Each structure stands twice: as structure tokens, then as C-alpha cells.
Amino acid sequence: MFDFCIDPQNLDGFYWWSCYLTTGKHISFYTSFFVVFALLIVTVPLILLFGFLGAIARQSRIYPIRIFGITYTSVVRGVPDIIFFLFVPIALDQGIEYLRHKFKCSEWVEPIRQGNDFVVCQIAKMPMGSSDQWIHDTYGFFLAALAFSIVFGAFAANTINGAINAVPPAQIETGVAYGMTRKQIFIRIQLPQMWAYALPGLSNLWMILIKATPLLFLLGVQDIVYWARELGGTKTARFTYPHSDWRLGYFIVLLVFYLFLSWVSEIFFNKLTLKVSKGQATLNGTVGGTIDYISVSDDEVRNS
Amino acid sequence: MTLTKLITGAALIAAFASSAFADGHTIRMGTEGAYPPYNFVNDSGEVDGFEREVGDELCKRANLTCTWVVNDWDSIIPNLVSSNYDTIIAGMSITAERDEVIDFTAEYFPADPSTYVALSGASDDVTGGIVAAQTSTIQAAYVADSGATVVEFATPEETVAAVRNGEADAVLADAAYLSDIVKASNGELSVVGKPVAIGGGIGMGIRESDGDLKATMNTAIASMKADGSLAKLIAKWFDGRSVEY
């Protein structure tokens, strides 16, 4: 990085550190922080989408759809994450390659499954074997993001389903009395009010999601925890910058990062909770004005 | 250059030319990147080490374009068989158990004895106590069979850390990996007990259905053994160790 970094053995103090902290490996570490944010940006809308679809399916009057919703939320929440993350992306990847193979290499006679092996023709590979590594990484990342969304979507579906049910029945009866259809009741009464009940559960999910990125390395995507472990590990004299086991230092950096993220999220969710519970009727009988959300949800949950 | 060498060379070139891979398509090389001196990620973030040099040379001789992929040890075989990369070149010993799932090329590194390392001053008895080893390695299987208590870790680094913080009495791993660690520890760690010979040599893992690539790599490995370049690389990365091929 700097001119004086050519011969690191003879450096010490400030110069050594400024060279050490700007090695290519450290740059990869710094950029991997964006992997965390990218994962959040890509998955959060998908999680909410899966969550809503799952919750609506569970509320459905049509039996097969309801069964589908219940199966989705129960099975996905029951399967251990690590199994899910090994299985879903590999299955998705093989599914995509299988279809491409059938489409592009129909003249192939060899079987795709050969013992343990999954073999498709070269041009059906996704991405192509000759593609740059970053394309492979991006592809793996999106497969992983999809797997994350399916898993967390199931948890979100359960939370949202519970929140919809938590809207006081008296309000729905009022809706019926006004002659609203089921759809109107859902959109005008249940949907706007369920947020206050769903937010505590959703904010929990958000916090867990932030910390779930190490699962990405199962798919070969290198995240901050991978790089912290890799950089902190003992470096023998084979490396340009030898040092002993510094993992503790690197993990403290991660700790600070995660605590900061939690703190910012906490502030954001508190603001959001105030906003969505504004003017909401509660069992306390308060109507209108700003209501302290804590008292709303606690009483509500206990009484319902 | 002697006449025999010339003939061997000509035969090898002919073999490469007829290979299905002579079109030079890209081969993805999967490695762990956490096991110096075999393979590690260097300070500029590139895969480096003995296997990097061997792999690049093999690809050059086989007229293949190769790219390097770092993958977790735990999922390194599943990702090979589902074709996310084409070879495993990660200090993987050839064992009968692995051979059932994947194929191996000829060895490019001879069987290396494994050694126990413990805190300096520990008696040899620690090899029968609690021993750390990396998950899914020949060492982990060996410790389990030896009657000692095995504690498994996902990365080599963690197995050594377990000895340092007292979680395990000793660690069992390839001698070449541990000797660097012992040297760098300034007397904190030392070798205990006798070295144990487990596992065969180290070969490149290849899908069972990929016979062409296996043949190509075997030819390239044979040519590196024949002209002494493999022995030179072993001497370079393993403290001047001399190997006869």
C-alpha cells in the first residue's frame, strides 16, 4: 500500500502497523463488512414477503393453502439451520443446472447422477467454470440469501400470524357490523394494527439475522467472522507479517461492530414502534394520542 | 538432458495433446487455505503455499487454466461432488474411506508422519489424555481409535489454540504443519511422544466420474516427479526435506 512497506521485517511501531493493516487480506476483511449489509438489504424484503405470504396462507379459508402455510412454518422452523444451509443452496444450484442442462445439452446421453457425483455439461454450469471468482461469489451469495429468506421467512410468518390474531376481536366485529368484506376487514383493520404486535418479534429476527452471516462460509462466501478468524490466527515466519494468536483482538473489533449495529437497530425499532402504535386502541381503554408501546404489548399479550 | 528423459518428455506431450482437456478450459481448484505450509491465504489475500505452486505447475504442464477457490474443510467433499469446483488440493491424505466417495490422483506428497504437540514440559502420557484434532481428518479417526479422548475442531488453528488454553492436553496433526507452529511459539509448545505413521500420501481429490481429468493430472504429476521439479518444491516448502521419486 505505502512505499515503505516493501521490507516489512525491518519496520516497527507505527510503520509496521500501517503496513499490516493495509495488506490485501485486511482490505478483504474491510470489504466483507459490506457483505453483512448486502445480506440484510437483499434478505429483509424477501423475509417480509415470505412472512406475509406464509401468514396469509395460514389464515386462509382454503384448506390446502392453510395446510401449506402450516407445513412451511412448522417444518422450516424445526429443521436445524446448518442442515438447511447445506441442503437448500446445493439443491437450488443443482436444480438450476439440471434445467439448463436439459435445455442446452439435450444431446447428452450420460446420466447427470453418477454415483455421488452431479455432472452436467460445461455450458450448463451456473455460473460458467471460466467465470471470474467474483461471479461465483455473487451467485453463491444470492443462493444463500434465498436460503436465509426461506428460513427467516418462516419465523416471520409465525410472528405475523400471531400479530394478526392479536388484533382485538371487538374491532373485527365492528367491521362486520359495518358490512365490510373479509378482505376489507383485513386491509383496513387487521393489517394496520398488527404491526405493533409484530414488531417485537420481527426486531428479534432482525438481530438474529445480523449475526447469522458466518453461515455464508458453508457456501464459500467469506464474511467478517471468517476473515477475523483467518487474520487473527497464528502467523508463522512464512507470512510477511508474523504474529501470535491475535484472534481475541479481531473478535473484539467484531464485538464492537455488532454492539454498534444492535444499538442503532434498537433506536430504529423504538422509533418505529412509536409510529405504528400511534392512535391505536388498547385494552387499557386509551384511544388516540401517543401510547407507550411497552404497556400496550405486554398487557395485550398477557390478556389475550 | 538424457535420451530417456527426451523420450519420456515426448510421450508426455503426446499424452497431453490427445487429452480431452487440451482445449484449455478452466479447472477450479478447491483448497482450505488454512494449513501452512500446504496451503494458506497469504497477506495479500491470495492462496499460497506448497500446493499453490504444485497446482499451478501441474495446470501449466497439462495446458489447463486454473483458478483457486477457498472452501471450508467441512464441506470440501460435498462441494466437489456437486461440481462447484473440480479438484480438491488441500493436503488431503488418500484413505480408503474417502476413496469410496471421490477419486484420488497419484500422490504428489509422500505419507507424512503425524506428531503430537503439547505445552513444553508435558510428559509423553498426554498422548493418551485429551487430544485435539481437526474434524474429518485421519488424525481425528486415529485418536478416537487409540483410546484417548478426542476433541474435534473445524480449523487447524483452533486445535492448537485448544492446547494453549488447556482445553486439550495435546494436538495431533501433520508434522509439517505443527513444526512451524512449534518453532514460532518460542518454547511454549514442544513435540511429545513418538510420531505416528497414519494415512497414505497426499493426492488431489477428483470426482469419480471425472476420469479424464484424473488421467491428465496423473500424467502431469508423473512428469513433475520425473524431472525433479516436485522434489525441489517439497524441499523448498518443507525445510529442505529430500524425497526420491
Image: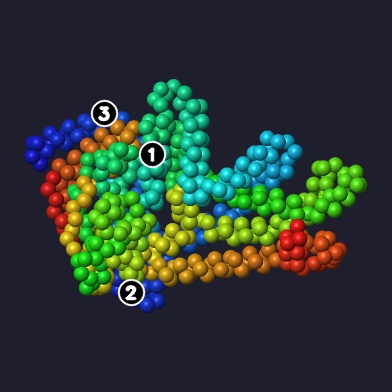
Crowd band around label 2 with a 10 angstrom C-alpha radius: few (<14), some (14–19), many (20+): some
Q: In this view, does B237 lie above or below A86?
A: below
- Residue in view at x 38 percent, y 56 percent: B154
Q: Quickly name the residue at label 3.
A: B18
Q: Disc 2 residue type?
A: Leu
Q: Badge 3: how crowded within 10 Å, few (<14), some, or many (20+)?
A: few
Residue B121 is situated, as x and y percent measured from the top left of the image, at 22, 73
Most extreme residue toward the bottom is A13
The crowd level at tag 1 (other Cα within 10 Å; few <14, some 14-19, many 20+) is: many
Residue B106: % across, % down: 22, 40
- Which residue is the site of mark 2? A11
Q: What is the quadrant of the C terminus of chain B in the image?
A: top left
Q: Earlier in the sequence, mark 1 or mark 3?
A: 3
Q: Is residue A241 left or right of residue A161?
A: left
Amino acid type, callout 1: Val
| Nearer to the camera, B223 or B87 | B87
The x and y percentages for residue A288 are 86, 64
SS for dot 1: helix
Distance from Cα at disc 2 to Cα at disc 1: 46 Å
Q: Which of the chains bears the disc numbered 2?
A: A
Where residue A28 appears, x then y in whole percent? 45, 59
Task: Tell me the residue at 68%/37% (across/down).
Answer: A65
User: Residue under mark 1: which chain is it in?
Assistant: B
In this view, the mark in front (2 or 1): 1
Q: Do labels 2 and 1 share a chain?
A: no
A44 versus A69 height, above or below? below
Could you confirm whether marks 1 and 3 are on the same chain? yes
Relative depth, front residue between B116 and B15: B116
